[in-house]
Image (cartoon, rainbow, N blue to C red):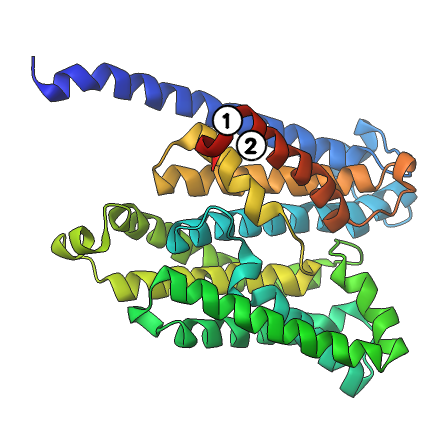
Amino acid sequence: MTILEATSPRSDHRASARQIWLLTVVLSLLWLSALSLRFGLRPISWHSIWDSFVAYDATNANHLVLQGMRLPRLLAAWLAGAALAGSGALIQSLTRNPLADPGLLGINGGASLGVILCIFLLGISDPASFVWVAMGGGLISTVLVFFLGGAGQGTPLRLILAGAALSALFLALGRSLLLISQRSLDVYRFWVLGGLDGIEMATLAALLPFFALGATLAAVSSFNLNAMMLGEDTARSLGLRVGLARGLAVCAIVCLCGATVSMAGPIAFVGLIVPHMARRFSGADMRWCLLFSALLGAGLMILADLMGRLPVFGGNMQAGVMAALLGGPALVWLIRRYGGAAL
C-alpha cells in the first residue's frame, strides 16, 4: 500500500466533515438573516416579510421598515462581518501573529483620524459623509505601514512594528483634536462605537466595488499564503514571487477593511476571534479558512446587530459593542478549551 493510498481515507473523511460543517454554517447564516428581518423593536410577521419582496407597498409601514432599514442593515452586516473576518485571517497568516487584527496595520487608526479631521476642520456631522474620508484615511495609513515595513521586502515583524507605531501616532493626534473640540467629540463618539445605523442602499452600492475587489484579491492571496506557509525560501523555489504575493494580500486587506470601517466604523474583535473559530472547521488550508471566516464573520455581525435591536438592550445598542460582548467570551472559551492550540 502506498502512502497516498494509506492517507486518502483520512483525507476523504476530513473533506466530508468540512463539507458538512460548511452546509451547517450556511444554513445557520440564512436562518439568522431571516430572524434579523423578523425581529426588532417592531416584530414583523413572516407574511409581511414575504409580501415586501413580492408585492411591495410604499404605504405599508412594515414594508417601509423592512426595505428601508432592516434589509440594508442585514446586507451591511453580511459585508462588514465577512470583510473583517476574512481580512483578519489574511493578516494573521501574513504576519504569522495569531493575535493580529485589522487594527494592526493602522487601518482603524487612519480611518478614525480622517473622520476626526473631517469633523474638526469641515464641521461635517452627517455619518453618511464619513465614508470617503474614512476610506482615504485607511488607505493612506496602510500604504504608509507597507512602505515603512519594507514594502515587498519587509518581514512580518517589521509590518507589525510599523502598524503599531502609526496606530499609536494616529490615536494620539485624534485624541488631541477631540480634547480641544467638544463638538467633534460629540459627533465622533457615535461613529467610533461601530454600528449599522442609518446605512442606505446607495452607500452599499458605492462601496460594493471595493468589497468585490478585496474579495477577489483575498481569494488569490489564499493560494499564495498556502505556499508561503511552507517557508519563504520554499515558496520562492516553487516559483512564487513573495514580495508580490505579500503586496496582493495587503491590497486585499486595505480594500476590505477600508470599506468596512468607512461604512460601519472601527468594529473590533471580529477580525481577531473569527479566524480562530474558522480554523476549527477548515484546518490549515487558507482557502477554506478564508471561506469559513467570511461566513462566520457575517453570522457574528448579524447576530450582534440583531441582539442590539432587542428590547432587553434598549433597542439601539451599537453592533460594534455587541460584537465585542459576543467575541470576548468566545475567545476566552477557546483559550480555556483548547489552550494554545486554538491560537
Residue 260 appears in the rendering: yes
Q: Position of residue 297 (x, y in %)?
A: 58, 42
- Residue at the extreme left: 1
Q: Is residue 198 above or below residue 1?
A: below
Residue kind at label 2, given as amino acid type: Ile
Answer yes or no: do the residues labelled 2 and 1 have beta carbons within 8 Å? yes
Residue lying at 16% horizontally and 51% vertically, measured from the top left: 234
Residue 134 appears in the rendering: no
Quadrant including the N terminus:
top left
Tell me: 175 left or right of 23. right
Q: Position of residue 268 (x, y in %)?
A: 65, 52
Residue lying at 46% horizontally and 62% vertically, measured from the top left: 160
Residue lying at 29% horizontally and 70% vertically, measured from the top left: 153
Q: Residues within 10 Å of mark 2 (few under 14, many from 20)?
A: some
Q: Is residue 298 above or below residue 14?
A: below
Say the numbered circle drawn on residue 335: 2
Task: Place residue 189 in its image quadrant.
Answer: bottom right
**What residue did someone put label 1 on?**
338
